[in-house]
């Protein structure tokens, strides 16, 4: 199976792509019937005991390779800012990503401290595209405009950035942090590439996001954060009350989890 072509074909109709953070979560999500997976930089960093943004390129590529090997599904990697500011850094990251069986990846315009100036972003995405197109089987490249999730909810600037990334050759456009269907509709009506939308706390549901024109819905670190919340709640119950009702909640899912872990896929 050509997972890269499969992933491209998925973007012809709306679909949801969840974000596992380790091999076990990848296998469980695949067993539930999802058609593709994406890594989460925050979920992976947290699994290493670190905050988001503290993973190296080598670690991210090795992690991506492991997730690719966990299931038969296409995998898209969250490659943050390409692990460097320069266009050359981004190109090298794409070349590394091409080597490990990924079906896609994303590159964002934020350097862990501030948004890149449009002039620099206008050089970084073309460099990623050029490196990607050097392969006979290129990745599906997602370009991310980080305004809304980085405290700068300027929709006009977000749209302008994504339109520039579209012109540079990005395959999919993504502005994490859009919180209303109106914002999503405004974006999707001004571009002609598939748009990925991140679910947000209290935000529109997946069907509402699709109705607003998006093609792909991702969850980012939401599922890993939900798992962490369960750890906190279970630990507090055990420590503060001495009870273990959390164990009974877990029993209901054990069959699904054990089935996923024992799969031969």
Image: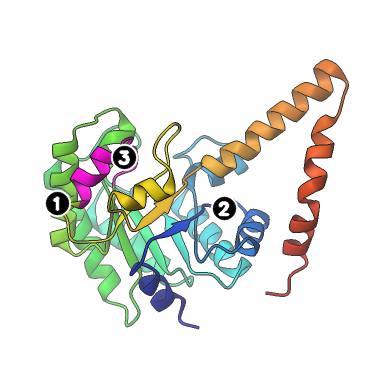
Task: Choose mark 2 or mark 1, whichever is in front.
Answer: 1
Q: Closest to the observer: 183 or 123?
A: 183
Determine crowd level at label 3: few under 14, some 14-19, many 20+ residues with C-alpha closer than 10 A.
some
Q: On the rendered structure, is 80 left or right of 144?
A: right
Residue at the top extreme, as displayed? 240
Can the viewer see residue 182? Answer: yes
Residue 56 magenta: no
Q: Earlier in the sequence, mark 2 or mark 3?
A: 2
Find numbered disc 1 in the image and state the secondary structure of the residue it sits on. loop
In which quadrant of the rendered view does residue 28 lie?
bottom right
Determine crowd level at label 1: few under 14, some 14-19, many 20+ residues with C-alpha closer than 10 A.
few
Q: Earlier in the sequence, mark 2 or mark 1?
A: 2
Query: What whole-number distance in Å separates the C-alpha atoms at marks 2 and 3?
Result: 23 Å
In which quadrant of the rendered view does residue 104 lie?
bottom left
Can the viewer see residue 80? Answer: no
Q: Closest to the observer: 22 or 212?
A: 212
Residue with the mark numbered 1: 190
Q: On the rendered structure, is 44 left or right of 119?
A: right
Q: Residue at x 57, y 62 (%)?
A: 67
Image quadrant where one finds the C terminus: bottom right
Residue with the mark numbered 2: 20
Task: Choose mark 2 or mark 3, whichever is in front.
Answer: 2
What span is colored magenta in the figure? 175-188
Q: Is residue 7 above or below residue 224?
A: below
Q: Closest to the observer: 70 or 60?
A: 70
Query: What whole-number distance in Å separates the C-alpha atoms at marks 3 and 1?
Result: 26 Å
Q: Residue at x 35, y 36 (%)?
A: 112
Q: Residue at x 56, y 36 (%)?
A: 50
Q: Which mark is residue 111?
A: 3
Find numbered disc 3 in the image and state the secondary structure of the residue it sits on. loop
């Amino acid at each position: 199976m050509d997972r890269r072509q499969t992933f491209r074909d998925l973007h012809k109709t709306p679909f949801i792509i969840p974000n596992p953070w380790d091999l076990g979560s990848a296998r469980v999500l695949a067993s539930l019937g999802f058609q593709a997976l994406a890594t989460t930089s925050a979920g992976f960093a947290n699994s290493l005991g670190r905050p988001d943004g503290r993973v190296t390129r080598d670690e991210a590529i090795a992690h991506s390779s492991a997730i690719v090997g966990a299931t038969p599904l296409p995998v898209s990697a969250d490659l943050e800012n390409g692990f460097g500011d320069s266009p050359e850094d981004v190109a090298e990251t794409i070349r590394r990503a091409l080597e490990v069986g990924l079906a896609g990846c994303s590159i964002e315009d934020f350097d862990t401290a501030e948004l890149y100036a449009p002039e620099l972003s206008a050089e970084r995405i073309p460099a990623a595209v050029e490196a990607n197109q050097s392969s006979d089987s290129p990745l599906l490249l997602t370009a991310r405009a980080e305004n809304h999730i980085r405290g700068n909810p300027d929709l006009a600037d977000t749209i302008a950035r994504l339109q520039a990334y579209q012109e540079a050759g990005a395959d999919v456009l993504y502005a994490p942090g859009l919180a209303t269907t109106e914002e999503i509709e405004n974006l999707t009506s001004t571009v002609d590439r598939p748009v990925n939308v991140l679910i947000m706390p209290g935000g529109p549901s997946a069907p509402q996001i699709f109705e607003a024109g998006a093609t792909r819905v991702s969850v980012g670190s939401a599922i890993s954060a939900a798992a962490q919340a369960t750890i906190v709640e279970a630990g507090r119950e055990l420590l503060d009350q001495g009870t273990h009702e959390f164990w009974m909640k877990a029993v209901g899912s054990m069959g699904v989890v054990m089935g996923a872990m024992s799969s031969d896929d």
